[in-house]
């Protein structure tokens, strides 16, 4: 077996292991981090398989863009759900407090 064949086999095993970890991770933020690692391993696999154009695409989309979009989406959802109950991260006197915004329940705002 050639050295490249050994690297391909090893990378395929790592991809399978990291993909299993990604599926079994319950927290979406941690899952996005694991998906980023999976994208990096897949880019490495495509490089070993002599597909540099696919590897660059995977590196950009699978390692950076997709996990970033997942993290931003989770952040926005957590802000929206925490805003109405008062238990979220924005319970202090930040820029959005003081009755300047109407919110979901019509409090504050113009009258």
Image (spheres, rainbow, N blue to C red):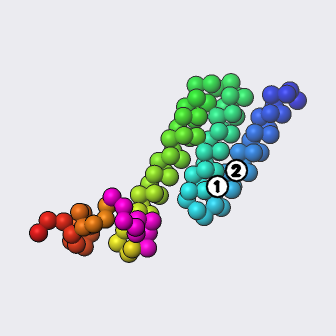
- Please report the residue visible at 64 percent of the width from the left and 55 percent of the height from the top: 22
The spot of residue 102 in percent (x, y) is 22, 66
State the residue in front, 31 or 54: 31
Compared to residue 66, the image places residue 45 above or below, namely above
Find residue 81 and report its image quarter.
bottom left
State whether residue 2 appears in this view.
Answer: yes
State the residue in front, 31 or 47: 31
| Quarter of the C terminus within the rendering | bottom left
Residue contact between numbered discs 1 and 2, judged by CB atoms under 8 Å: yes
Q: Residues within 10 Å of mark 2 (few under 14, many from 20)?
A: some
Find residue 49 and report its image quarter.
top right
Q: Residues within 10 Å of mark 1 (few under 14, many from 20)?
A: many
- Is residue 89 one of those drawn in magenta? yes
State the residue in front, 73 or 62: 73
> Which circle marks residue 18 in the picture?
2
Find residue 96 and report its image quarter.
bottom left
Tell me the magenta residue range: 87-95
The spot of residue 62 in percent (x, y) is 56, 40
Q: Is residue 104 left or right of residue 94?
A: left
């Amino acid at each position: 077996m050639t050295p490249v064949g050994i690297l391909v086999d090893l990378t395929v095993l790592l991809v399978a292991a990291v993909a299993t970890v990604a599926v079994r991770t319950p927290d979406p933020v941690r899952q996005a981090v694991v998906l980023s690692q999976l994208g990096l391993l897949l880019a490495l696999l495509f490089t070993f398989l002599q597909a540099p154009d696919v590897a660059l695409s995977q590196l950009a989309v699978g390692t950076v863009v997709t996990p970033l979009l997942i993290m931003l989406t989770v952040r926005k959802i957590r802000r929206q759900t925490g805003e109405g109950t008062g238990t979220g991260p924005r319970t202090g006197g930040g820029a959005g407090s003081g009755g300047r915004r109407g919110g979901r329940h019509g409090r504050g705002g113009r009258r």
